[in-house]
Image (cartoon, coloured by chain):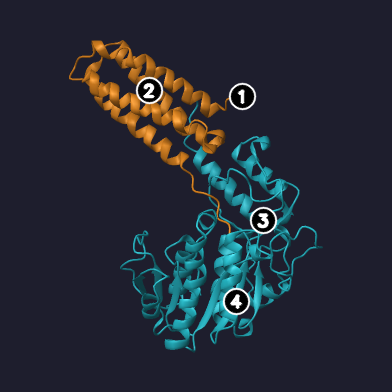
């Protein structure tokens, strides 16, 4: 494949990394995102076309889809914004997906759609034996997951060629403020996935003929399988924050350990083990501490 | 819970600012006491607002708070010694240091799908 790839929500960090990956291969990229977002570093770059618009507008979406060979559909309202306004969340996450599907059917029927879904769609899995397989019943515990389940159904009922990636919580190797309350219980099973590996999975999914028509869990793999408390306390230790500062949910969140054997077999994306992520965070903390002179 | 080193630095910086405010009536060398008072007060409000941010509990917050404390102490030294000629430049440096600290304190949230 060498034709254009459309990345919806493409001005975000994952979209930008994907764009760079495709450009390294000489493949043209079309970035679709809201007019008001920051396009610095994308606009005017060779091989990158910008399609500014709103995913809830079917005409704009149709124009963006014309002539593409693949669509990576990242655009969505994410938590916590997704939990504030049901109508808006469904308009973006479900209707927006429907607009992509209709446009593909109409103007790019040969293109493959890679859909960024979520492991949140499984809901509370704490009473089941791990790992969570893709055939586990979907039971949303928040609006975001509900909208992703509905969007998956739109795609499955369509005539589009698709790959569905249910992506775990993404660990970003940067010094970031954690949520006020971690979205899991302290002793809950937790498996995140490194951002770079998510990019690799999405990228590989556009090219894998064997992945078409499949639903795949995307998570970090065995080295990332831990518990909420162990994960958080390791991060806090690197930052010098006392562990008692951490606040956890008192009811189960939608995290667990996942069966990723099939996704790894098809997409070969798990390149960043958990210790590497911790080393990256430590390097970032060391860099930030580098300015400290003797007081 | 006990204050972190950064929170201590911030409190010390605020105390220095309060003392500097008390010296401004005698300012000379082109320093506008009213405008300086407003600028310092705004910075003090901003610093007080970020004191409980998560960033202030982390080790990487120590360097920028040390920088702010030093810049504020320099201001106080200049005011106490009547060196008003360089005060404006030192105030601008302090403002820049506080802005850098505030920017770092606004860490982006964790991404979860």
- Return the residue at label 4: A153
Q: Residue furthest right?
A: A129
How far separated are the C-alphas under marks 3 and 1? 32 Å
Q: Residue furthest front?
A: A87
- Seen at 52% across and 71% down, the residue is A94
Q: Nearer the viewer, residue A220 or B108?
A: B108
How far separated are the C-alphas under marks 1 and 4? 52 Å
Q: Residue B2, labelled with which disc?
A: 1
Q: Nearer the viewer, residue A213 or A103?
A: A103
Which chain is cyan in the picture? A
How far separated are the C-alphas under marks 2 and 4? 60 Å
On whether disc 2 and disc 4 are found on a single subunit, the reply is no
Q: Chain of mark 4?
A: A
- Residue A199, relative to residue A240: is it above or below? below
Callout in the foreground (3, 4):
4
- Seen at 56% across and 36% down, the residue is B58
On whether disc 3 and disc 2 are found on a single subunit, the reply is no
Callout in the foreground (1, 4):
4
């Amino acid at each position: 494949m060498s034709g254009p790839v459309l990345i919806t929500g493409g001005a975000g960090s994952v979209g930008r990394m994907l764009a760079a990956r495709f450009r390294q291969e000489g493949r043209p990229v079309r970035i679709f995102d809201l007019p008001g977002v920051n396009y610095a570093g994308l606009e005017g770059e060779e091989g990158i076309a910008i399609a500014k618009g709103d995913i809830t507008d079917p005409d704009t979406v149709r124009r963006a889809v014309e002539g593409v060979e693949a669509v990576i559909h990242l655009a969505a309202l994410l938590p916590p914004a997704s939990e504030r306004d049901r109508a808006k969340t469904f308009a973006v996450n479900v209707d927006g997906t429907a607009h992509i599907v209709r446009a593909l059917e109409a103007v790019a029927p040969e293109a493959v759609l890679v859909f960024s879904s979520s492991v949140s769609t499984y809901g509370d899995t704490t009473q089941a034996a791990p790992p969570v397989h893709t055939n586990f019943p979907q039971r949303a515990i928040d609006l975001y997951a509900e909208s992703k389940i509905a969007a998956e159904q739109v795609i499955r009922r369509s005539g589009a060629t698709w790959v569905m990636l249910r992506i775990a919580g993404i660990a970003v190797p940067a010094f970031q403020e954690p949520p006020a309350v971690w979205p899991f219980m302290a002793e809950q099973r937790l498996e995140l996935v490194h951002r770079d590996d998510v990019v690799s999975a999405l990228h590989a999914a556009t090219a894998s003929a064997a992945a078409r028509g499949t639903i795949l869990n995307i998570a970090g793999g065995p080295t990332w399988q831990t518990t909420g408390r162990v994960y958080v306390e390791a991060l806090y230790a690197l930052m010098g924050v006392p562990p008692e500062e951490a606040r956890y949910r008192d009811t189960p969140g939608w995290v667990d350990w996942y069966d990723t054997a099939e996704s790894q077999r098809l997409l070969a994306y798990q390149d960043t083990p958990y210790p590497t992520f911790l080393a990256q965070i430590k390097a970032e903390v060391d860099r930030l501490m580098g300015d400290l002179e003797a007081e | 819970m006990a204050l972190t080193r950064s929170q201590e630095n911030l409190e010390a910086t605020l105390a220095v600012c309060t003392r500097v405010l008390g010296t401004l009536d005698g300012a000379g060398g082109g320093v506008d006491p009213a405008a300086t008072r407003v600028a310092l007060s705004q910075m003090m409000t901003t610093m007080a607002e970020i004191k409980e941010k998560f960033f202030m509990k982390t080790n990487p917050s120590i360097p920028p708070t040390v920088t702010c404390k030093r810049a504020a102490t320099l201001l106080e030294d200049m005011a106490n010694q009547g060196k008003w000629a360089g005060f404006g430049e030192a105030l601008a440096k302090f403002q820049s240091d506080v802005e850098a600290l505030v920017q770092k304190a606004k860490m982006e949230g964790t991404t979860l799908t």
